[in-house]
Image (cartoon, rainbow, N blue to C red):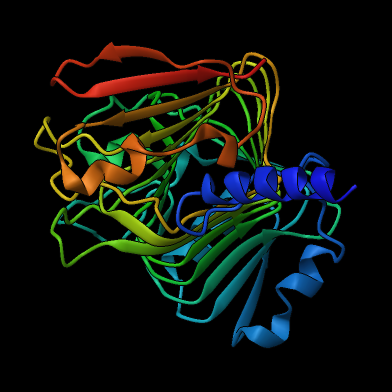
Amino acid sequence: MKKISAVFLAIMMLFAFAACDGSTPADENGPKMPEAPISERYPDSDYTKTVNVKNAAELTNALNELESGTKIVLAAGEYDMKDSVMTDQYAGQGNWMFLVNEENVAIVSADDADVTIFSTDEIPNGVLATQDMITVVADNVVLAGLKIGTRHSDNKAVDVIGNNVTIDSCTFIDGAALYIAEYDQTEENTIDKATVQYSTFEKNATVSITSGVSGDIRFSDNTFENGSSLYLTGSRESGWNPTGIDVSSAVFTRNAFEAGSMLRLAYEAEDPQNDSLASLDPSVIADNFGAAEETVGDYGETIKFFIAN
């Protein structure tokens, strides 16, 4: 009995070391669901102002009048943002569709409300303002309880540039992409805290966590359906990612990857900024990935694909 216990302890210690500097192995029980409704997790009392909206026009007005400390609550319905034009500018660009540029803001669904945000616009994909549907540039922002589709110009459905942004209980549909990356692209400007939890990524939806992201990354209780993907990208060869990525302190817990979903790692093997990807054990994200498929990218970076089985 003592011998069996010793062997079991040794196995558990090896598994713990594989968790990569504090990352947590996936739980076999799968994602958990939050116990409290959104109104209790993000109560009105935490904000200085609450605005209730029931259509895309009202949502656009609320965003244009946004103040720090605002909570926007969306009633059930479809919000087609095609006619939304933001009056504020960011990065010298105007005409954003859904810009969140004030701190300490929550944009959430009403409890039990089926809220879908998408856009049928015909704007060509060009500068950053035309690439994104929802762009979060401020810190301490929450998006919760939202079903998020794409905009007609197929690019980023949600672009997270701010620090300490939480994506909570959202569902990404129709191939929608969640993108988390620092825009300023300097070593001093990094995203050192981001949370994605209780969310579902339907077929062909993607999550990209990439340049300028490090530190307290929490990715828990999410579900990836067949055909969806998580990208961790640290390659800097393209010139657009000069700050690399560091997931050595990231926490991955209870994420479910259905058969056919994918984890993709891209990094420069000899770049110390990407050591965390080169040494990442995919089992800390999910325990049912197959063997790595490896290739070389357009900029000479190593790319590894892990397909869930």
| Residue name at image x 13 percent, y 58 percent | 186
Q: Which of 147 and 165 is in front in this view?
A: 165
Q: Nearer the viewer, residue 156 or 240?
A: 240
The answer to whether residue 170 of the structure is visible from this angle is no
The answer to whether residue 62 of the structure is visible from this angle is yes
x and y percentages locating residue 58 in the rendered image: 59, 58
| Residue 204 in the figure: left or right of residue 278 | right
On screen, residue 153 above or below 53: above
Name which quarter of the figure residue 222 lies in.
top right
x and y percentages locating residue 79 in the rendered image: 62, 42
On screen, residue 110 above or below 152: below
| Residue name at image x 44 percent, y 18 percent | 305
On screen, residue 146 above or below 187: above
x and y percentages locating residue 86 in the rendered image: 36, 55
On screen, residue 37 above or below 172: below
x and y percentages locating residue 4 in the rendered image: 83, 43
Name which quarter of the figure residue 295 lies in.
top left
Q: Which of 154 and 218 is in front in this view?
A: 218
Q: Which of 155 and 32 is in front in this view?
A: 32
Residue lying furthest right in this view?
Answer: 1
On-image quarter of the C terminus:
top right
| Residue name at image x 68 percent, y 24 percent | 225
